[in-house]
Amino acid sequence: MPTLTYPHWRDVPATAWRWPNFSAAEIACRGTGAIKINTEAMDKLQALRDRLGKPLIIRSAYRSPEHNRAVGGAPASKHMQGTAFDIAMANHDPVAFEAAARAVGFLGFGYYPRSGFMHIDLGPARSWGNPFPARPVPFASELPPAREVLSDSRTLRGGGAAGAATIGAAGVEVLQDVLAETQSTIQPLVPYLDTLRWVLIAIALIGIAVTIHARLDDWKRGQR
């Protein structure tokens, strides 16, 4: 069980760190900055991260003896050996997390539902504390956000209709002003253009309403 010890996590050579989802600062002692790297424990921690497919928020990993005393840790805490981790359950289902941790080889489990974390270590096999209560609603499966095809996008259609109708209404208004200054033979067309302008304004308002509705509907369905 190879163990590497450094006076501070900044002293860890880049070549000695092979766990891509964690940093030396996360594993180091919170009180002194010192670090003890148990490679077996770190390999299992990385395997757990890979198995779960989501971040592990580390509350505590290695503790120096003085820091362990300061926080009231057990006299023979596995944290001082670098073989224990306290992981927040904020983004995990505790039942699924524990099953995955056991599957990759962790043997010791401590439950701290009031503080929101679970202790895991390399053993011996044991457990303590009150298990986390069952969640009333399980975690939803994580799916990539759906995107509409542009040619079928309600948002694009609504926005396009609103834009085209707005430009058309502005053009009609300009044309109306021009015709109003022309000869009297063209002036009878002006009232009809006024009606057309209002029709285009109505289309623009409908397009805006469609765009807003599509945005709200997409947001409700989690597609944005």
Image (cartoon, rainbow, N blue to C red):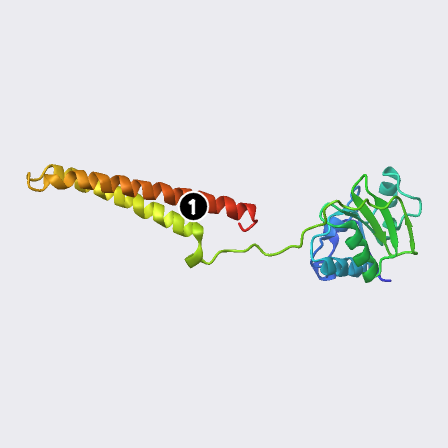
Asked if residue 17 shows in the view, the reply is no
Residue drawn at (27%, 39%) of the image: 198
Asked if residue 131 shows in the view, the reply is yes
Which residue is at the front of the view, 211 or 20? 211
The location of residue 11, given as percent across then percent down, is 74, 52
Q: Is residue 194 left or right of residue 1?
A: left
| Residue that carries the numbered disc 1 in the rendered image | 211
What is the three-letter code of the residue carrying label 1? Thr
Residue drawn at (80%, 52%) of the image: 95
Helix, strand or loop under label 1: helix
Q: Is residue 76 left or right of residue 40?
A: right
Task: Give the answer, above or below, for where 221 lies relative to 70.
Answer: below
Which quadrant, please, contains the N terminus?
A: bottom right
The location of residue 120, given as percent across then percent down, is 84, 52
Task: Give the answer, above or below, for where 223 lies relative to 187.
Answer: below
Q: Is residue 98 left or right of residue 13?
A: right
The location of residue 146, given as percent across then percent down, is 54, 56
The location of residue 57, given as percent across then percent down, is 73, 48
Residue drawn at (72%, 46%) of the image: 137
